[in-house]
Image (spheres, grey):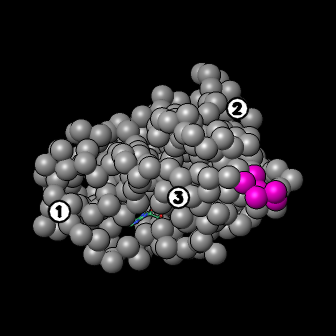
Amino acid sequence: MLGADAAGIARAAEILRAGGLVALPTETVYGLAARADSEDAVARIYAAKGRPGHNPLIVHCADVAQAERIARFDESARAAAATFWPGPLTLVLPFRADSGIARRVTAGLPTIALRVPAHKVMRAVIEQAGVPVAAPSANRSESVSPTGAEHVLATLDGRIDAVLDGGSTECGLESTILAIREDGTGEILRPGPIDAQRLRNTGIALGPASGRGIEAPGQLARHYSPGKPIRLDATEAAPDEFLIGFGEVEGDFQLSSGSLEQAAASLYAALHLAARSSMPRIAVAPIPSAGIGAAINDRLRRAAAD
Ligand code: TXA
Ligand code: MG
């Protein structure tokens, strides 16, 4: 376990340069990082997570200039990056195959997912490593994403070189993924902290879902599973259920008394807690779908799918 101080940051950067794996805090969830220009280092991410090789990774850059060396940005992409980077937005753009990024990162797709994270520690590590960093969420494939260092260790202990403990993450949900199409329109492949309205406000036209969502295989699979059956829109708990409450519905754990931002930030901690509880089933109070509520409900539906 590394600390979120100068020594911890320097050590994390050193491990990355040497081709190792470090779990790092971002403003969304913890990421499992490896240098994105090394086929071997990237292969280690897939192995540690037990992730299928056809599910591509997000590359995290220090700044827009580094990102523009990896993908082609049109006017819409530049507008989105200028407004939301650094921050919880991932852009899927045409990949520059000669950029030196390992082919395994994109799983052979002609596009690549890029983001410039806002978390100070993550940014410092990327800058010191001097290379872009591939990082999926730091959990075993299909399990709940980590919003604290202890969640990372719960599924990846012994499979990675280090975890840098930066405390709880701020947003608590993975970044919004926006694909920019050849005609400049956008398609949300994964709802997240930046909602559709905020994207439209920057002048980006959002096309209807093309069904090409198959491009984000991680989005189709059973996902975010706490390993127990989940019942949604519950207003009270059955005797064998751990109830995750929101608003008026009082649970064994309360997401928030009404703030959706707070609910997003505590959702995965609640699922981790519910998974560890003695109750064999989980129930979740209704969550409104406004703003980040759409992303919360997206994750809950996937967690409840069997
Ligand atoms: O907030 C986040 O995005 C976190 C932090 C660590 O940055 N990362 C994250 O990564 O959630 P991961 O691997 O758990 O989810 C990445 C998603 C997957 O569903 C993957 O299929 C999709 O991004 N993806 C990656 N490259 C893609 C591409 N070229 N086209 C479409 N989808 C892509
Ligand atoms: Mg993930």
Q: Residue at x 17, y 62 (%)?
A: 185
Q: Which residue is disc 1 drawn over?
A: 185
Check the image and report above or below for 102 versus 202. below
Residue 127 is situated, as x and y percent measured from the top left of the image, at 45, 34
Q: Which residue is disc 3 drawn over?
A: 299
- Mark 2 Cα within 10 Å, few/some/many (few <14, many 20+)? some
Q: Quadrant of the C terminus?
A: bottom right
Q: Which residue is disc 2 drawn over?
A: 2
Q: Nearer the viewer, residue 137 or 252?
A: 252
Which comes before the other along the chain, label 1 or label 2?
2
Of badges 1 and 3, nearer the viewer stands 3
Q: Which residues lie in the magenta part? A: 237-242
Which comes before the other along the chain, label 1 or label 3?
1
Q: Quadrant of the N terminus?
A: top right
- Mark 3 Cα within 10 Å, few/some/many (few <14, many 20+)? many
Check the image and report above or below for 110 versus 258. below
Using the rendered view, name the quadrant where residue 232 is placed.
Answer: bottom right
